[in-house]
Amino acid sequence: MTGLRERLAARLPALLALALPVLAGIAYMASFGAPEAYLAITGASLVVALALILSAPPGPASLLTRRIAAALCILLMLLPLATGPTMNGIARWIPLGPVALNSGLLALPLLARLAAQDREYGPWMLAAALLAALLQPDAAATFALTIAAVGLHHVTKNWRVGFIAILGFFASMYAGIHGELPAVPFVERVLVQAAGDSGPLALLLFITLLASFALMLLTGPGTRAERFALAGSLFGFAVMAVINNYPSPLIGYGAAPIIGYAVALAWPSGASR
């Protein structure tokens, strides 16, 4: 019992970083007539995500393990190009039975931490993921990578990471022009939609998403560089979801961001090299 309490206390910030915005999103969806399947899938994803964080093994992860995980994240980003589905020439979803997982939201949170853990190959990881997001094209993913790189550069002062951030800014502009799709209620632009439905609920969504960002930035797992990169990715996804028709991470319907950020928060630390 004491061990469980200690584990719970140690991982409470990570648990709250996920639970607060997701539960607020469920409350909003339930209040304004979202399909029951949205509520069920979001709730089930949260349960799985919290279990992942609580059951994650302690670190550190070996350098080889981290680099293999980064390669798998990049392959996940590229997978929709081979499997589809495709809409208007855009492929950014991994089909999984009745659920389609957004590849960027699933893979990029962990990749942000892995890039921060690897001084030698971290910039190349970000560059490869940026190319994959550009091929889809996905402006939310490119902008999330851009802000993750900005956060990582802020800590490390690595000029290669700064160069990736600059490339990411231009990639986001290109993807934004070529990758726009119609907004889906309760999925894309959730804060904008909620503001028109209920001011108090929109404020709750904003506050819980901001709290999630702060928890990842200030008390999240890993080094300062990892926290800045991870929180930067969330900031990038969230801002693009307000600006254009892209999924709202954690507060909107979608299993991918919940599982993606759970894996990133559960991933063990590893000394940067």
Image: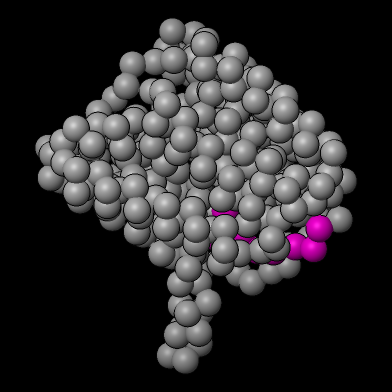
Relative placement, left or right, of 99 versus 175 is left
- Please, is residue 57 above or below residue 110 in the view? below
Q: Quadrant of the C terminus?
A: bottom right
Residue drawn at 47 percent across, 26 percent down: 93
* 186 is higher (above) or lower (below) than 167: below
Q: Residue at x 62, y 38 (%)?
A: 147
Which residue is the extreme one toward the bottom? 2
Q: Is residue 97 something that shows in the picture? A: no
Residue 185 percent location from the top left of the image: 25, 28
User: Residue 31 at x, y = what percent?
Assistant: 12, 45
227 or 86, which is in the foreground? 227
Type of colouring: one colour
The one nearer the camera, 26 or 82, is: 26
Q: Position of residue 101 (x, y in %)?
A: 44, 34
Magenta span of residues: 264-272
Residue 237 horizontal side relative to residue 226, left or right? left
Residue at image position (42%, 26%) is: 243
